[in-house]
Amino acid sequence: MGVSDAECSRIPARRFVAQALSNLVPRSNNEELPDLVIHRGEDPIPEYNNPDLVPGMYPTLFCLGIGGFEDQSRPEKLSFAKQAEYYLNIPDRNFRYHYSFLFVILNMVQRRKSHLHTHFTVNSTRFQSIAPKLTSLSPETIAEVAEIIENEKSTKSLNSEQKLAMDLLRYVNAVGEKIPGSHMAKISARADIRNYFGYFGLAHIFFTFNPSAVHSPIFQVMYGDKTIDLDSRYPKLVPRSERAKRLALDPVTAADFFEFSFQCLFTHLLGWDFKRQCSTDKGGILGHLRAFYASTE
């Protein structure tokens, strides 16, 4: 056998186009779609209660197609966030090293919290007039208005109840107190701090704790570098560029390092017992702590 014109330099471009068009035609009457068209459905894939969703998105991580989230056949119920945390902490670090798995799962966790913990607030001066009108709306009207807002549909053909609901939305604010990083979460944290002031008194010290994972030999050991001797006063580390790459590659270990450093600081330096949730008998360099409030960026 021999091959002539291996680079297809003698075949005109129109023949390639014609062949591509012919491939779009079903080869038999039993085929509904041509073989080269990506098969897709008209309905989007559900995100909730779909254990096949994440394994289908990441076949290289879920090689057997099992181990998805929110699997109703599992004997012990496991929340989405807890299972995601488990995958990021197993010895196989392929999950935490994947370039998009961490961000997609975090986005899905935030979406669930935003769906389950979002509510309305209204100014106290308008509460008596707004609250009865909101509660008088029928569930059908609320669902219709929610669909209009979500899909950005036209509001010109609204009925009287729908117009009332749209008008009332001008006087309320949708907030999500338990959504990490949201504006309402920050307001809630400030309210907690004020409550601490009212019960324990004004805080005596304020400081920002910012351990550097790049320069820490402890982080390098947690990353998996077994050549570092922590018993040495000045452990020999890899070059700074390599340490920075490790930090960027493994943000989960960076978070574990921060949590470890934070607990070491409060346990050994400030004398706080995390199990008993109170100060130790000996106390720390500031004496015995009554309480502290910490918030991570």
Image (tube, grey):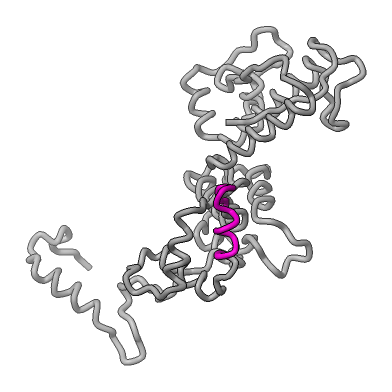
Residue 62 appears in the rendering: no
Q: Which residue is drawn at 69% across and 50% down?
A: 82
Task: Check the image and name the residue furthest to the top.
Answer: 233
Q: Position of residue 183 (x, y in %)?
A: 53, 40
Task: Check the image and name the residue furthest to the right.
Answer: 281
Q: Which residue is drawn at 18% across and 76% down?
A: 21
Q: Where is residue 174 in the image (x, y as percent from the top left)?
A: 53, 52
Q: Where is residue 277 in the image (x, y as percent from the top left)?
A: 84, 31
Q: Where is residue 281 in the image (x, y as percent from the top left)?
A: 92, 18
Q: Residue at x 58, y 70 (%)?
A: 136
Task: Check the image and name the residue furthest to the bottom.
Answer: 29
Residue 226 appears in the rendering: yes
- In which image quadrant can residue 273 be found? top right
Q: Is residue 12 left or right of residue 156?
A: left
* Image vertical order of residue 288 relative to residue 119, above or below: above
Q: Provide the residue span drawn in magenta.
A: 121-134
Is 290 included in the stretch rendered in magenta? no
Q: Is residue 119 left or right of residue 283?
A: left
- In which image quadrant can residue 132 be found? bottom right
* Image vertical order of residue 122 relative to residue 160, above or below: above
Helix, strand or loop for the magenta stretch, by majority: helix
Q: Residue at x 50, y 73 (%)?
A: 141
Is 125 included in the stretch rendered in magenta? yes
The front one of 134 and 54 is: 134
Is the C terminus in the top left, top right, bottom left or bottom right quadrant? top right
